Amino acid sequence: MAKFMCTICKYSMEGDTPPEKCPSCGNTCSFVDATCYTPECGCEGNLNPDIYKSRQ
């Protein structure tokens, strides 16, 4: 299962595929795969810090 993050509000969720509308902000937005695939990376919620920080 992957972790996806909304590109607008940074809501993160786990799933096989991202939803069409964000459950948090309600926008039709794109989600990015923010899964941390290596043991040494990861910030809150095991999100990839490179992706998370680039969206702030």
Image: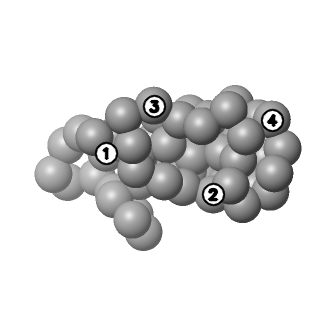
* Residue at the image point whose x is 63% and y is 57% from the top: 11
Front tag of 4 and 2: 4
Q: Which mark is residue 11?
A: 2
CA distance separating discs 1 and 4: 24 Å
Query: Is 53 left, or right, of 50 in this rendering?
Result: right
Secondary structure of residue under mark 4: loop
The image quadrant that residue 2 belongs to is top left
The amino acid type of the residue labelled 2 equals Tyr
Q: Which residue bears the numbered disc 3?
A: 17
* Residue at the image point whose x is 80% and y is 57% from the top: 25
Of marks 1 and 4, which one's residue comes earlier in the chain? 4
The amino acid type of the residue labelled 1 equals Cys
Secondary structure of residue under mark 1: loop
Of marks 2 and 1, which one's residue comes earlier in the chain? 2
Classed neighbour count for the residue bearing mark 2: other residues with Cα under 10 Å, few (<14), some (14–19), many (≥20): some
The percent position of residue 47, horizontal first and vertical second, equals: 41, 53
